[in-house]
Image: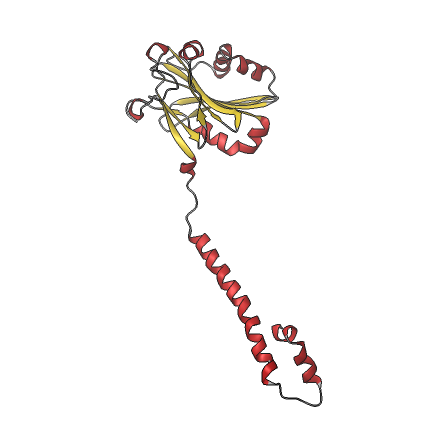
Amino acid sequence: MATIFSSPSAIFSSSSTTKTPPSSSSSPKLSLLPCKQQPLTTLTAAAAIAAILISAPPPSLASDYQVYYGTAASAANYGGYGGNSSKKDSAEYVYDVPEGWKERLVSKVEKGTNGTDSEFYNPKKRAEKEYLTFLSGFRQLAPKDAVLSNLALSDVNLQDLIADANSVKSEEVKDDKGQVYYVYEIDGVGTHSLISVTCAQNKLYAHFVNAPNPEWNKDKDILTHVHKSFKTVGGTF
């Protein structure tokens, strides 16, 4: 087909009763050589690019997050601001932080009043954040509904979120060591929240992941990953 369309003069000359030998200056065969090789060159280049893309390893999901090690130190023993002194070998809990998120510095007063131990936020969407609070003196979890209500007592924003929520879901989950976590999902009027609560080392830990509904719809996979990454650790990690 390439010969027919690229050389219309050949069609007319073949139907003529008088066959004139083609001149050396306008040979159809010579004029077809560049037309045949150009598509082959393009296909070869495309195949090479495809081979490179296929052979390249997929990006690692782990590189999109960093692990935060939290010590849950009391306000009296809180060494400075922001919890940057957290060490891997003294961590009481861990969770993943998306790449590019920033740590908000937590004051001693805030830590002493509502137990906030750490917080990170998305600098491009500041209302999209995760944070952890803890309370001492808890050896085991109360019923699920009671735990959520007690958390709201020291968190006005959580009170409003629950009061205006479209739905509140809760479930009990056990990890591979048998530790119990209460998991809550609150679909609020303007905000979506994922909460994970557990007890360990005579402390109650609550990990929050909050985002306005537009951001939740866009970043649901990332926020769910962050939510599921939270866990407590004991002794050396």
Look at the image and tell me in which quarter the N terminus lies. Answer: bottom right
- The single residue placed furthest to the front in the displayed view is 25
Q: Is residue 221 left or right of residue 17?
A: left
Image position, residue 179 (x, y; %): 38, 23
At a point 44% along the width and 9% down the height, the residue shown is: 113
Q: Tell me: residue 91, above or below residue 51.
A: above
Instruction: Give the tally of numbered discs.
Output: 0
Image position, residue 121 (x, y; %): 48, 25
Residue placed most toward the observer, 34 or 185: 34
Image position, residue 74 (x, y; %): 35, 12
Image position, residue 57 (x, y; %): 41, 48
At a point 70% along the width and 84% down the height, the residue shown is: 15
Q: Tell me: residue 63, above or below residue 4.
A: above
What color scheme is it? secondary structure
Look at the image and tell me in which quarter the C terminus lies. Answer: top left
- The single residue placed furthest to the bottom in the displayed view is 18
Picture quarter containing residue 24?
Answer: bottom right
At a point 47% along the width and 56% down the height, the residue shown is: 49
Residue placed most toward the observer, 80 or 222: 80
